Image: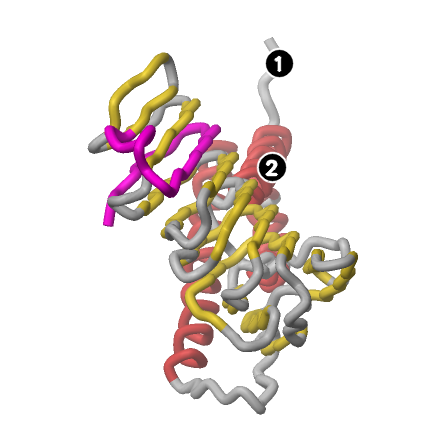
């Protein structure tokens, strides 16, 4: 049997590690900045030097991995120090565009038209933290802070229906899009259909003040917290997620039906009765004036519905 060479073992493991990092980052299970990789280019010289040392192969492997791990820890610690130090000393000002490298703000909005009774918002959101928590006298206001790609907004009106689309300006994925904080303010007058297509995201939507007819959340590895209201007679919420933590809050007086299809999940549906496989309803479902229909398809997840 041929003796395996040091370089074959080493570079094979390196390729596996790099591929694994891509998978874990894309699914949102971990986050790191690829600029860290770029800063570590001198490691090539160090590893090359280790490979020509007159020592045994297993010692070369041990030395190489120790050097790589130590370098990642030191460089990443420095990156986090800079990031935390910057945020500690940063004061938000609506009129100021942040000049710190890789950090900037963006505000986009559409004026309210009183003839609009129904509105559709389609948001391609990529990764980051997303909040709906406030109202506005405009139709919509979006504030973004972070190092991700800027967004572009388009609007089309047909009769009393306005369709708003928001997406990144460029289709290319931003490498450092973890630091992406987006807040969305909506007008309370129209009946809203909301469609969010996201990657790995932290989602906190307080929709209790709005008339919401249809809500669709398509997310990867995410934390999802949605508070629904009773401003519209029938509200439908569809959540399609990967590895996620999902909390949905509903008004006590609203009847609710939940269809849940999850894999390896922890489901907590207090106050619901099982009607048939995968379908649960509250006791007041038939007699309530307002009804909420929730459909959840998720992978490994924690799923909770809570009354308020």
* Residue 292 lies in the magenta stretch: yes
Question: Would you place residue 240 above or below residue 110 in this image?
Answer: above
Which residues are the magenta region?
282-308
x, y percent for residue 80: 43, 68
Q: Nearer the viewer, residue 186 or 183?
A: 186
x, y percent for residue 151: 68, 65
Say which quarter of the image contains residue 139: bottom right
Instruction: From the image, tell me which residue sits under label 2.
Output: 19
Mark 1 residue element: loop
x, y percent for residue 128: 52, 58
| Total numbered badges shown on the rendered structure | 2
Identify the residue at horizontal 60%, vertical 79% (top origin): 101
**Among all residues in the image, which is located at the extreme left?**
271
Question: Would you place residue 125 above or below residue 54 in this image?
Answer: below
The numbered dot on residue 192 is: none
Mark 2 residue element: helix
Taking the image as drawn, is residue 181 in sight? Answer: no
Instruction: From the image, tell me which residue sits under label 1.
Output: 2
Label 1, label 2: how far apart the Cα atoms are: 27 Å
Which color mode does the image show? Answer: secondary structure
Identify the residue at horizontal 60%, vertical 51% (top origin): 49
């Amino acid at each position: 049997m041929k003796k395996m060479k040091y370089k074959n073992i080493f570079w094979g493991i390196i390729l596996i590690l790099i591929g694994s990092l891509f998978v874990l980052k894309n699914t949102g299970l971990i986050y790191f900045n690829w600029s860290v990789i770029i800063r570590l280019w001198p490691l090539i010289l160090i590893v090359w030097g280790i490979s020509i040392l007159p020592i045994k192969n297993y010692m070369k492997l041990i030395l190489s991995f120790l050097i790589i791990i130590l370098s990642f820890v030191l460089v990443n610690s420095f990156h986090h120090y800079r990031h935390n130090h910057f945020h500690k000393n940063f004061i938000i000002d609506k009129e100021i565009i942040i000049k710190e490298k890789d950090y900037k703000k963006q505000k986009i909005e559409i004026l309210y038209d009183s003839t609009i009774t129904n509105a559709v918002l389609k948001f391609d959101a990529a990764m980051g933290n997303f909040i709906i928590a406030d109202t506005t006298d405009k139709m919509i206001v979006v504030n973004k802070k972070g190092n991700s790609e800027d967004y572009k907004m388009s609007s089309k009106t047909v009769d009393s229906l306005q369709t708003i689309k928001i997406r990144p300006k460029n289709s290319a994925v931003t490498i450092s899009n973890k630091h992406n904080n987006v807040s969305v303010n909506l007008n309370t007058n129209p009946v809203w259909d909301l469609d969010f297509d996201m990657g790995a995201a932290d989602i906190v939507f307080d929709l209790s003040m709005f008339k919401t007819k249809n809500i669709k959340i398509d997310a990867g590895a995410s934390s999802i917290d949605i508070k629904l209201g009773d401003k519209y007679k029938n509200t439908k919420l569809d959540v399609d997620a990967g590895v996620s933590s999902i909390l949905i809050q509903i008004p006590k007086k609203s009847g609710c039906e939940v269809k849940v299809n999850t894999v390896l999940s922890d489901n907590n549906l207090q106050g619901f009765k099982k009607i048939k496989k995968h379908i649960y309803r509250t006791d007041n479902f038939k007699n309530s004036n307002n009804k909420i229909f929730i459909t959840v398809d998720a992978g490994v997840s924690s799923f909770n519905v809570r009354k308020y």
